[in-house]
Amino acid sequence: MPRVAFFPDSYEEVDGVAMTSKRLVGYAKKNGNPLLVIHAGKKTEFIEDGSISHLSLKRSPVAFPMDATLEYDPFFQRHTNRVIKALMKFKPDVFHITGLNDVSIMGSYLAWKLDLPMVGSWHTNLHEFAGRRLDKTFRFLPESISAKFIGFAERKILDGALLYYKMPKLLLAPNEELINILKKGTKRDARLMIRGVDTEIFSPQKRTVSDGKIRFGFVGRLRAEKNVRLLADLEKAILDAGKTNFEFLIVGDGNERDWLERKMKKAVFTGFIEGEKLAETYANMDIFIFPSETDAFGNVVQEANASGAPAIVANSGGPKFIVEHGKTGFVCDTVDQYAKYSLELMDNREKLLRMKEASREFALSRSWDSVFESVYQAYADCVKLRKEDRKKSSPI
């Protein structure tokens, strides 16, 4: 079994990357696989837990926010000697990085310095993420001008990310669209790494409401890149259609929350919740609305499916690869389409019930174990590729 040095950019934070990273660590621990996890944390410390070694590194006071919980520390490299000592003790066969932030940049540098193979997994569409932020910032400009500027910025950010992802020997991505982009841009082997879902934690059995009211749900950061203002537009369209027996359950926090609270008339805002409370809230949703156009995968869509809620998602980004249009949800291009399918399910309870059952059945087929079995196969193949390259370059 390969000995893996894992450098997740997000681990103690609250986002999809951190959730997936912790799942990977849990899988390694359950199977006794040796794994060294190097991540940012509240304090610098080394902890051993069975086959898992954790090296938590505190970011400096000058670290600045990249997102609600994620930061970038320009002085993170000050921990390099400490990390090298941990690596020398652990003796990894392969490195794994998850993105383009301070932790993974250190991992990439040390993989090069120690001449060890590296797997890179793509989790965040940084170019689209930045584009949505810029769109919000430059709303005061004419659309013809801002669109050109934002398009240029997105292309350059993507070019930079692809240059960075040329460093790993083998790449993992959550959907076929990204796999094709990575293969073309890096000339590397890129493979599918979907996400699993815990169907015991997220289950329709945890539903606590039975009043006949239709509940639309959203879970995620309330920020521009999630396109959350569409929720207010959708609510208006449903009200304009004469519907009143519904509400929105909106889980999460961010700088768009105040705007949404002012605009929406039938929405309940829970803020950030987790654990059983989150599972119960998911189960109380009848239809999941996820308008984000920047998510590389969309873990929350599968969590909603597992809870028995079909999802209506954007025809851009990763969630569209999760939803089977007309069976486990719908894929939309416009607000009018979101409204059309929402009203269709409100009016046809039998169809809604069928889609709820199909969504749950789909989620039951997505196990985390099968996901990480393929990741460990990628580790083994990456080590093998490096050995073959060394043989080719060695003198006879």
Image (tube, grey):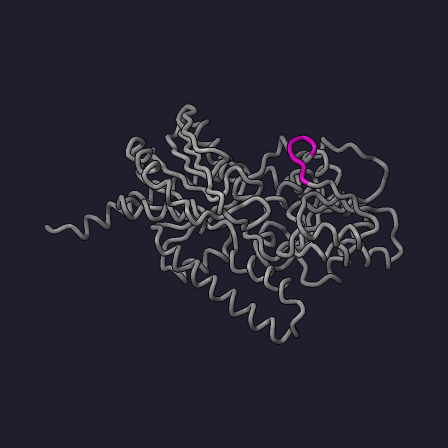
Residue at 51%, 56% in the rendered image: 126
Q: Position of residue 209 (x, y in %)?
A: 81, 34
Farthest residue, direction top: 50
Query: Residue 243 vs residue 342: left or right?
Result: right
- Foreground residue among 197 and 55: 55
Q: Position of residue 218 (x, y in %)?
A: 70, 47
Farthest residue, direction left: 396
Query: Residue 383 vs residue 280: left or right?
Result: left
Q: How many marks?
A: 0
Image quadrant in which you'd find residue 337: bottom right
- Foreground residue among 276 and 133: 133
Q: Is residue 319 above or below residue 6?
A: below
Highlighted magenta segment, given as a residue range = 272-277
**Residue 51 appears in view:** yes
Q: Position of residue 30 (x, y in %)?
A: 46, 27
Residue at 89%, 56% in the rendered image: 242
- Queried whether the magenta region covers residue 311, the answer comes back as no
Farthest residue, direction front: 61
Q: Position of residue 227 (x, y in %)?
A: 66, 57
Residue at 63%, 31% in the rendered image: 201
- Foreground residue among 383 and 63: 63
In the picture, which quadrant includes the N terminus?
top left
- Foreground residue among 177 and 143: 143
**Residue 327 appears in view:** no
